[in-house]
Image (cartoon, rainbow, N blue to C red):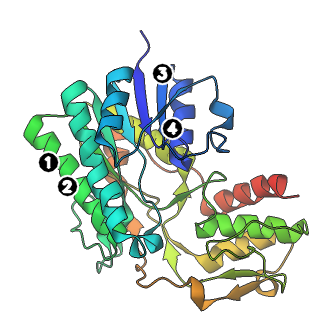
Amino acid sequence: MAKKAVIIGVSSQDGSYLADLLLDKGYEVTGTIRHSTNYSHPNLAHLYGKIRLLAADLIDQESLANVIRQAKPDEVYNIAAMSIPADSWTHPIYTGEITALGPVRLLEAVRWFAPKAKVYQATSREIFGNIEAESANEQTPFDANNPYGIAKTFAHMMTRSYRESYGMFACGGILFNHESPRRSLHFVTRKISTGVACIKNKVKRPPINEAGEPLIGKDGKLHLGDISNKRDWGYAKEYVEAMWLMLQNKTPKDYVIGTNSSHSVEDALRIAFKHVGLNWRDYTVVDKKFFRPTEIKELKGDYSLAKKDLGWQPKTSFEELINLMVDADLAIFK
């Protein structure tokens, strides 16, 4: 009999890649989207007819309970969240409701209606904040410094608490930044790959950025925030495999997933523009309106425990990741 899985937030980058992975492994997949979500989300187009879609919202306890009751899952993956740290300052209460309390509502639904199901909770590198360290592992103390990171810390600790208090098989995946062609345009790597494609292909109507302006300004350039920022960036398609491996493990644990390397936004610009034969300096403007109220420092994700326990390690290099994103956007924005 095929295993059954529920993905909360299936239209997201991670949710859609996870659905692909689980379908390839023969799972019956139920994915949730919010009541207000457009069913024509581009990340879902290839999944129609392959998975069951149900409406649910992390703010609505009953909707989550209904999904668990209907799906009777063996595995539950919570990918959904208010996922943009900068926006969490604009909507701190909503961020808490969705990103902090939402996972607890889901854990309660699983505890009551599918107590034997294994649960994956998506945690974030943001829980570490600005700790003074070169890299972080599972023992690194939390020091979140924005509403999103604080909410993720709460959800992570509650997942651990349910594991210890109720004996649930519940894992927290502390994922460092991970990107792909399915990444939202709110994130800088996708801004870069899309911007490069629009400039190279001379797109007359580029997509709109979070400021409500065309991604490419009237000056024909890509406007970004602080390009000196460094992140540990990996490939999302590989990171969802780590999520699945956590729930196949004999013992529920929390794991850090990263590449243990870091690159700057400037590095991404250089690679992306070079890929299409252009010099990034000719097409980029640093714009202070895209700077965050608080910025996290460089930190690398030490994935050694995941490698030891799960046999997981990153395969795609940063340059390969940026290039595949540019290639994908060159095909989209013509």
Against 307, residue 1 (above or below) is above
Q: Visible in this render: residue 67?
A: yes
Residue bearing the label numbered 1: 161
Amino acid at the residue labelled 2: Met
Residue density around tag 4, few if under 14, some if 14–19, many if 20 or more, within 10 Å: many
In the picture of the structure, the residue carrying the numbered disc 3 is 27
Instruction: Identify the mark nearer the N-term, 3 or 4.
Output: 4
The residue that label 2 is drawn on is 157
Cβ–Cβ under 8 Å for marks 3 and 4: no
Name the residue type under label 4: Leu
Q: What is the three-letter code of the residue carrying label 3? A: Tyr
Q: Which mark is residue 258?
A: none
Q: Picture coordinates of residue 216 (x, y %)?
A: 78, 76
Task: List x then y, in percent, for residue 228.
Answer: 56, 85
Q: Residues within 10 Å of mark 1 (few under 14, many from 20)?
A: some
* Visible residue check, residue 311: no
Residue 16: percent from the left, percent from the top? 56, 40
Question: With 106 as the anchor, is 242 left or right in this view?
Answer: right
